[in-house]
Amino acid sequence: MERLRKHLVNSLRGGQAFVPIAKALNNITPELRNIRPNENLHSVWEELEHMRIAQEDILNYMIDPDWKSPDWPAGYWSNKVNELSDEEWQKTHNNFLDELNKVIDLVNNIDIDLLSFIPHTDSHTYLREILILIEHNAYHTGKLVDIRKALGDW
């Protein structure tokens, strides 16, 4: 189980088969954080905020039996904002990383059998939820890179 935990943490952080989230977010030009390169792509902030909302949902689903998930799909995407302050960016950025660290702490918690069912669910394991989060974050990290490339900021 220790080997599995290590693999999961490495995948959560990225950098094996895909760009690490830290690298995808590093040195983004502040003026480009909320720019959509075209009408078919979100902004970097919109993608990151979506990742944060989904990650928050998955984490809380695993640890809080009273957690209520956002409405699908609208609740998983923010409303487009015309102006994005540095404070709003930092809030999204920091909350995403803080929640990612909480997921990593959960993975590393030896009191949790990752193969067991989450007690307040009928058929979902911790491992299932963690793998969904890894896949989701990897997919959207790739989108962050593509958006930055389209903006000439990669």
Image (tube, rainbow, N blue to C red):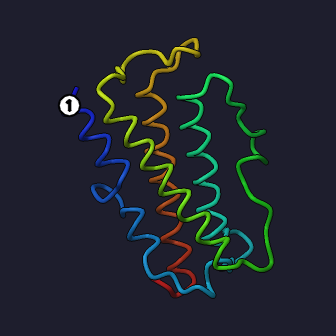
What is the secondary structure assignment of the residue under circle 1? helix
Q: Camera-side residue: 130 or 108?
A: 108
Give left or right: position of 14 versus 54.
left
In this rendering, is residue 3 above or below 95?
Answer: above
Q: Residue furthest left?
A: 3
**Residue under the point 36% across and 24% down:** 114
| Marker count (numbered) | 1
- The percent position of residue 34, horizontal first and vertical second, equals 68, 77
Kind of residue at disc 1: Glu
Q: Quadrant of the C terminus?
A: bottom left
Q: Which residue is mark 1?
A: 2
**Residue under the point 65% across and 74% down:** 87
**Residue under the point 35% across and 59% down:** 18
Give left or right: position of 69 versus 154.
right
In this rendering, is residue 137 above or below 89?
Answer: above
Q: Quadrant of the N terminus?
A: top left
- The percent position of residue 62, horizontal first and vertical second, equals 53, 29
Q: Camera-side residue: 141 or 102?
A: 102
- The percent position of residue 143, horizontal first and vertical second, equals 53, 64
**Residue under the point 67% across and 65% down:** 46
Q: Residues within 10 Å of mark 1 (few under 14, many from 20)?
A: few
- The percent position of residue 45, horizontal first and vertical second, equals 63, 69
In this rendering, is residue 137 above or below 72?
Answer: below
Q: Camera-side residue: 41 or 86?
A: 86
